[in-house]
Amino acid sequence: MPIHTAAALPSIRAAAGQLDHLSWSGITTYNQCPKRFNFRYLEAAPEERKSAALIFGGAFHRAAEAVFQARLEGRALPDLNTLMATYTTAWKEEADQAPEIVYAKGDDEMTLADLAGRMIAAFVEHAHQEAVANPQRRILALEHADRFRLLPETPPLEARLDVLELDGECLLVTEIKTSKSRWNDQKVAEALPQLVVYAHALLPLLRDVGAKRIRPTFLIVTKAKKPVVQVIEPLASQRDVLRLREQVADVWKGVRAGVFPAREGWWCGACPFRTSCQGR
Ligand code: SF4
């Protein structure tokens, strides 16, 4: 359902033409709400608010990254106080820039900081166990970004990989997630295309590092009273690759045609462009 007039289409096409890449996050944004995609990626509209969950996820990521950074540099893992300081600094940096922060019911800055402390403790314990169980693993890169062309007619896809490790003949790519609950099979299936994107992005690197296989992995830390760390290594099939191609092609077709309908749902509550959306 196109929502733009014929007169507006040339400028939309011009804006779409300026997109030099697509990302998995952009594809999921379009699939959830095309209008939000337009605000974020084509109009580059300023954010009116930010979800606390998003700021929390980013700050937790920074603490987790500090653990991997220590391993990369051959240092002892940072203690919990140091990691909490990393979390707090990252939280503050993002929160200070947000015009408004949207908290879920029952949450505030303090309850989230408590939760972060428990999750970081669980994550560090997991990191210690992993180091003992797999001493041969070598970290190659953190926050590695790569672009590749999945389809000739679409812009390249950008993959941002949290952790890249070499383990014998395997190139391990780990995506760190936080989640309200443990992931089940359905959740893994939904997130699988993201790992397919990563596997594609890493193909040229395989030879360079002398590896023969890519092992994409989700590392999930639950936001619970007693957080658990789940490590899942799903297997992607040819069908998953085809599904990803279809998804990317469909999104790009919609973007090029200026199809940006509002798709309302629970996600509108924390939408950074809600006021602008309601005003149009
Ligand atoms: S408020 Fe809802 S419908 Fe409007 S852009 Fe945001 S997510 Fe889409």
Image (spheres, helix red, strand yellow):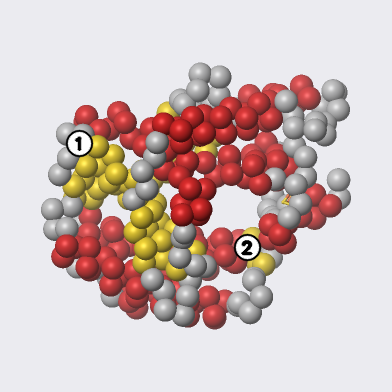
Q: Tag 1: residue type?
A: Ala
- Rendered residue at 23%/55% (across/down): 72
Q: Tag 2: residue type?
A: Ser
Give the image location of residue 248, x and y in percent: 56, 31
Foreground residue among 190 and 103: 190
What mark, if any, has residue 162 been given in the picture?
none
- Rendered residue at 47%/75% (across/down): 224
Label 1 sits on residue: 211
Label 2 sits on residue: 51
User: As drawn, which residue projects farthest toward the top?
Assistant: 152
Query: How crowded is the residue under tag 1: few (<14 C-alpha within 10 Å), some, or many (20+)?
Result: some
Relative side of 266 to 197, left or right: right
For the question of whether residue 85 can be seen, the reply is: no
Foreground residue among 101 and 5: 5
Give the image location of residue 66, x and y in percent: 33, 62
Query: How crowded is the residue under tag 2: few (<14 C-alpha within 10 Å), some, or many (20+)?
Result: some
- Rendered residue at 67%/36% (across/down): 42
Residue 254 position (above or below residue 267): above
